[in-house]
Amino acid sequence: MADSRLFVGTRKGLFTLERTTQNWEVKCQQFKGAPVSYAADDYRNGAAWACLDHGHWGAKLHRSFDGGERWEEIPAPKYPEGAEITPGTPATLRYLWSMAVGGEDQPGTMYFGTEPGGLFRSDDYGDSFTLVEGLWNHPSRLTKWFGGGRDYAGIHSIVVDPRNSQRMLVAVSCAGVFQTTDGGETWQPKNQGMRAEFLPNPEDDVGQDPHLMVACPANPDALWQQNHCGIFRSTDGAETWTQVSQPGGPAYFGFPVAVDEQNPEVAWVVPAASDEVRTAIDGALLVCRTDDGGGHWTQLRNGLPQRDCYDVVFRHALDVSGNTLVFGTTTGNLFVSEDRGESWSCIGNYFPPIYSVRFGRFNGN
């Protein structure tokens, strides 16, 4: 089953968990002591990828062709000679933040989003990488892109349209959402309807701060976004965005968002107190779900700690597969729900701080 394995990237390595008849159990730990910013597998063939952040030693990339049993380090994406973040500041890889696979017609294609804002493409399963220069050379990058919590802008969300692999969307902190319809040759900002309250012009087409963007697999034109300034939804492929945050309620600020694989009206977020506080709201952890496209939000607390809890959930640390959801927290707690978030159980209290959680997507066929 595609949802019988979990890849959990943490501050101290990658944990692979497998579902048993009773619970989830840690199968193995890889890269002990090393921060794993993101890890996931390729639904097309089961290859697994791990992005490591070695700090002083830089970002490293590892891949596995046996589902995560054995790993090999491969050369990480490299910015070309002469590339500059800003005039006089050479562009070097600082962080591997996101990953996506190409379409069914691109069996060897992989994309990696990085800080300082470069999108890299490989057409040979990571043997070589090319900077997507159409995005890197976008005229807004030098003047309107900036770091949102990191030194420089970074690409944390990559959505490849399963109907047309030439169409792709990325989300950048801080810059916003950009779209290509020609395989990356040209890009256009797609931020109409968003508001960045911290900008002189909150409705500027570039400078928005999406925290995460996801698309419904069954309807790729239905996009959800947890933004720095609320929750936004698009029903027209990012041409326009509508804020669907909960007025006066907790569903507003946070980092992760997940959308139901079949129903684009259903989505989940894990709220945090505020930009200034960034902990669970009032010391109580909760998940919010909408079943009507953001019209109403239901607070889901059953099984989650409701006092003296100060966890927060990073943007890549929530995932959904069928009726099963899982999320991990900054204090190393890992929670799972088998009923669409109605009730939760803790499957681990003592992990290192969790950066990413992803279900294994390969079904073995």
Image (tube, rainbow, N blue to C red):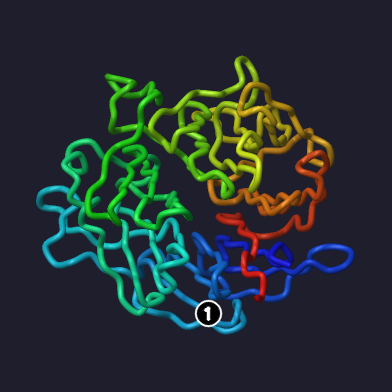
Q: Is residue 261 left or right of residue 64?
A: right
77 shown above or below 73: above
Instruction: Please provide percent x and percent y for residue 219.
Output: 55, 44
Instruction: Please provide percent x and percent y for residue 21.
Output: 88, 67
Secondary structure of the residue carrying numbered label 1: strand
- For the residue marked with disc 1, what is the amino acid? Ser
103 shown above or below 190: below
153 shown above or below 282: below
Q: Quadrant of residue 194?
A: top left
Tell me the quarter of the image containing the N terminus. bottom right
The answer to which of 359 and 116 lies nearer the viewer is 359
Q: Residue at x 29, y 53 (%)?
A: 116
Q: Residue at x 73, y 27 (%)?
A: 298
Q: Is residue 46 left or right of residue 297?
A: left
Instruction: Please provide percent x and percent y for residue 327.
Output: 67, 50
Q: How many marks?
A: 1
The answer to which of 296 and 94 lies nearer the viewer is 296
> What residue is pinned by disc 1?
64
Q: Residue at x 26, y 67 (%)?
A: 130
Tell me the quarter of the image containing the C terminus. bottom right
Mark 1 closeness class: few <14, some 14–19, many ≥20 residues within 10 Å: some
